[in-house]
Amino acid sequence: MVKKQKEIWFDGRSVPLERSDIWGLVNNSPIEKVVVSAEQRISGHFPHKTHLITAVRDTEDLAGLAGGETVFSDSPEVLEEARRQGYRTCVFLSVNDSEALEQSWQEAVKHDYAAVDFDLPTNIPLELIIARLQDSNTVLLRRVSTADDMEVAFGVLEKGSDGVLFSGMDSNEIIGLTSYLRKERACHLELCPLVVTEVRHTGMGSRACIDTTDLMSREEGMIVGSTSGGGILVCSETHFLPYMNLRPFRVNAGAVHSYVWAPNNSTEYITDLAAGSKVLCVNTKGEAREVTVGRVKTEVRPLLLIKGEAAGRELNVVVQDDWHIRIMGADGLPRNASAIRPGDSLLAYLCEPGRHVGIKVDETIIEK
């Protein structure tokens, strides 16, 4: 469903703190990991979203770092001491000949991350390192300075590097990188028609509205379901309501036991969602984007069970029993929940069943 996200690091060591134009672009991009010097770390202010990786030249600089941080260095002595003190480590390797290439992967496997720079534009050295590290736990980053180079790095040997270390102060390249990342971090779900087989009032229960920090269109909503094998597209509150204003940031998602589909091929129980959680906003074409939860509002309401069959599999969703709740029809038009009847066709998403704490697992799980 969703590709594993690539690591994107911005090398900020050469960017003066007063370059607010560059830092502003980075801070408003999807980039969260920034390599800074120990001096920048002390004197600079960085947004809360930023995960800083500190470049360390001497072992004495380790004293000011908090536990759990990542140390970036080209010094084996510094990195060895950093590992001894419990830090995660990223080795920086410059490859300019075959001997350095052979040494690079042998050094890389000792660390959590390896950032590699090459003296020539050929991708052959990167291909060789990717092949050498494919069975290791080391995250491989290629140093690049353009958005085009980043895209190439991600395509080498089809698998690509695990990420990139982006260096440079060209604002157009940072804008290009941001555009590429936002496109890549979207995903596509194969939606299919679901024929309704049963609609039944189930009495009172707790249902939740998921309020996001973004605005949704009339074609968007969230995939919600009672089983891990798939769900039904529940519409955003962007359709006519006679007695209240629209809430384009909201999906009245359904009963609190339900799964909601989230990034990285995962699901979340509605009860596990809170401010800052991530979920998928999905449109009628199956185009999905990550949105952030701002609030989850739970109230007791009458509930409605909607069961159906899609591609020979049974799915169901339990939503608030009210006319103003909309479920997306297979034709891309919203249906009022209380007006849905057996034989109607809705828009659904099917996936392989079986999850543990929202993560796909290969085991036998029976859900009814």
Image (cartoon, rainbow, N blue to C red):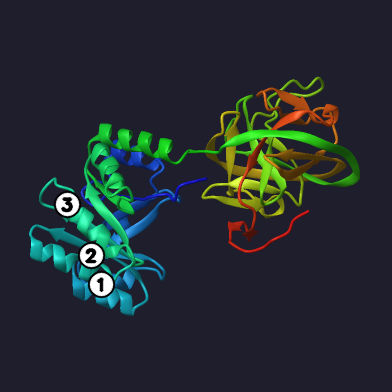
Specify whether 21 is left or right of 209.
Answer: left
Location of residue 147 in the rendering, given as x and y in whole percent from the top left corner: 27, 38
Q: CA distance from mark 3 to mark 1?
A: 27 Å
Q: Amino acid at mark 2?
A: Ser
Mark 3 and mark 2 residues within 8 Å of each other at the beta carbon: no
Q: Is residue 42 among what the camera can see?
A: no
Q: Number of marks in the image?
A: 3
Tag 1 near tag 2, CB within 8 Å: yes
Looking at the rendered structure, the secondary structure element under dot 2 is: strand
Q: Is residue 343 left or right of residue 151?
A: right
Callout 1: helix, strand or loop? helix
The front one of 210 and 197 is 197
Q: CA distance from mark 1 to mark 2?
A: 7 Å
The location of residue 99, given as percent across then percent down, is 9, 66
- Residue 254's place in the image compared with 176, above or below, is below
Q: Outermost residue toward the front?
A: 312
Disc nearer the start of the sequence (1/2) = 2
**Residue 220 vertical placement versus 255 (above, below):** above
Distance from the alpha carbon under mark 3 to that under mark 2 = 24 Å
Residue 79 tag number: 1
Which of the labelled discs sits on residue 73, or is there none? 2
- Write the residue at 14% across / 53% down: 118
Which amino acid is tagged 3? Ile
Whether residue 143 is visible: yes
| Mark 1 neighbour density, 10 Å: few (under 14) some (14–19) many (20 or more) | many
The kind of residue on which mark 1 rests is: Leu
Taking depth in this image into account, of 352 and 115 the one nearest to the observer is 352
- The residue where tag 3 is placed is 124
Which residue is located at x 31 percent, y 38 percent?
20
SS assignment at label 3:
helix
Query: Which residue sits at x=82%, y=37%?
Result: 197
